Image: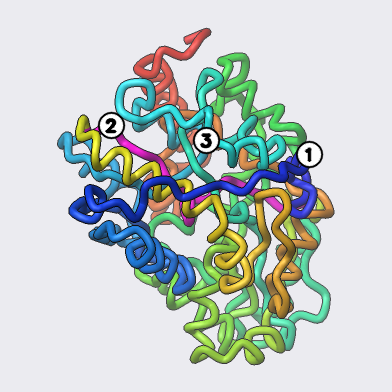
């Protein structure tokens, strides 16, 4: 995947038209949108703008960002369907929705040609595009307090050394948020970027030519590195109960030196600083981190990624498609400017006034980001829960890898993947 400003293929001069949004028939339509509670204010404002311009009512159903995947999947499993679903664009996330049966094929939409090679690695299965991706990829790495660390770690060996120094000064080296469950899987995934250039390891596991539980696998090595950090006392004492909001506050306040997170957490970081962007920029930096190199990890994120479930209602399905065309059409440049994020559609300029920390994120992405190894592997959603057992000492790295491999095999067979 190329850098965001070059993510894009040849320029397409055509302007997308919001078709039929102001017709009287559409004005009686109401759409249900399942969305992530972490949607930033500019994105929420776009929903309102669509309502105003189209006359279509958008009912927002907020899914808490804590447990977002599990909650969405549980609702989905009951047969409940929204008209628009905001969700992950990873192949593994998409397969969980059974797209050929449940989602509308958007392959013919104009925004795809304006997105370069984005849909080769995201939002598509078997050559069909189901997603409309408007958000910059989630970039995973290490947020660090610049007042506590003038030189951030460039490898896990550096991380361990920094841990020893910071502990002696009374600072929590790395703040972990086991109470929010999902953040604890980030560090092991970061570790593996060195072994996943070109998504080689992810493809090998997804294609059943390698196993997560192989002796000495990159996955086991990542878990072992994490277990070593915990043994050395590098994490906060309340690791089991602390939330990601707690981690952001600890980082900004200087109680903790580092937090492994992704770029979609910038609004939470800003909130932790009382809404003062200058405080964030003066205090917090961001770098890529992998096992032995300063590589960032990226994944197509759920924020601003939309799917259109099949509902069987022609009027609602038409209005839902209008929504996608609105979000990827003339309104997109306004969103990029307001959100101060980087565009993924060709012909849209980078915004002005981008925060220093987001510039750090983009630099980390541009200088060598590797796609998360688990992006194309079904059944890896149980990793966070297994990490909780690793933290509690109930399982060792090899046992975690063996159990997760079993979940992958079960999911891969259920999805009908070749080779399983």
Residue 187 drawn at (x, y percent)? 59, 54
Q: Earlier in the sequence, mark 1 or mark 2?
A: 1
Dot 2 falls on a residue whose secondary structure is loop
Write down the residue under mark 1: 10
Residue tagged 2: 310
Residue 106 located within the stretch drawn in magenta? no
In three-dimensional space, the C-alpha distance between marks 2 and 3, rounded to whole angstroms, equals 16 Å
Q: CA distance from mark 1 to mark 3?
A: 20 Å
Q: Which residues are magenta?
A: 295-311
Who is closer to the viewer here, 316 or 149?
316
> Disc 3 marks which residue?
123
Q: CA distance from mark 1 to mark 2?
A: 31 Å
Q: Is residue 368 left or right of residue 32?
A: right
Q: Residue 156: x, y in percent? A: 73, 56
Mark 3: few/some/many CA within 10 Å (<14, 14-19, 20+):
many
Q: Secondary structure at mark 3?
A: loop
When asked about the image quadrant of residue 310, the answer is top left
State which quarter of the image contains the N terminus. Answer: top right
Which comes sooner in the sequence, label 2 or label 3?
Answer: 3
């Amino acid at each position: 995947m190329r850098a965001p400003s070059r993510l894009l293929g040849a320029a397409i001069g055509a302007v997308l038209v919001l078709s039929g949004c102001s017709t009287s028939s559409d004005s009686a339509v109401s759409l249900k949108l399942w969305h992530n509670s972490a949607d930033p204010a500019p994105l929420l404002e776009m929903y309102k703008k669509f309502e105003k311009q189209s006359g279509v009512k958008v009912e927002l159903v907020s899914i808490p960002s804590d447990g977002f995947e599990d909650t969405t999947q549980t609702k989905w499993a009951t047969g409940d369907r929204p008209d628009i679903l905001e969700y992950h664009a990873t192949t593994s996330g998409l397969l969980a929705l059974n797209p050929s049966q449940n989602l509308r094929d958007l392959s013919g939409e104009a925004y795809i040609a304006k997105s370069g090679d984005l849909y080769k690695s995201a939002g598509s299965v078997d050559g069909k595009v189901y997603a409309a991706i408007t958000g910059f990829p989630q970039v995973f790495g290490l947020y660090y307090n610049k007042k506590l660390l003038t030189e951030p770690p460039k490898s896990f060996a550096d991380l361990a050394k920094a841990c020893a120094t910071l502990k002696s000064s009374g600072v929590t080296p790395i703040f972990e948020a086991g109470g929010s469950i999902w953040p604890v899987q980030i560090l092991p995934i970061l570790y593996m970027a060195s072994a996943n250039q070109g998504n080689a390891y992810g493809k090998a596991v997804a294609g059943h030519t390698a196993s997560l539980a192989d002796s000495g696998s990159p996955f086991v090595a990542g878990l072992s590195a994490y277990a070593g950090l915990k043994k050395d006392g590098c994490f906060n004492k309340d690791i089991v109960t602390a939330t990601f909001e707690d981690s952001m506050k600890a980082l900004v306040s200087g109680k903790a030196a580092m937090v492994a997170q992704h770029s979609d957490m910038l609004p939470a970081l800003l909130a932790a600083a009382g809404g003062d962007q200058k405080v964030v920029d003066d205090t917090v930096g961001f770098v890529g981190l992998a096992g032995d190199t300063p590589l960032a990890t990226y994944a197509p994120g759920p924020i601003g990624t939309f799917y259109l479930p099949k509902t069987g209602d022609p009027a609602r399905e038409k209005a839902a498609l209008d929504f996608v065309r609105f979000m990827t059409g003339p309104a997109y440049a306004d969103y990029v400017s307001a959100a101060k994020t980087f565009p993924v559609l060709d012909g849209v300029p980078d915004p002005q006034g981008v925060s220093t920390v987001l510039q750090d994120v983009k630099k980390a992405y541009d200088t060598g980001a590797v796609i998360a190894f688990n992006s194309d592997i079904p059944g890896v959603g149980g990793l966070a829960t297994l990490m909780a057992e690793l933290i509690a000492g109930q399982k060792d790295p090899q046992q975690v890898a063996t159990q997760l491999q079993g979940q992958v095999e079960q999911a891969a067979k259920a999805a009908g993947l070749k080779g399983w």
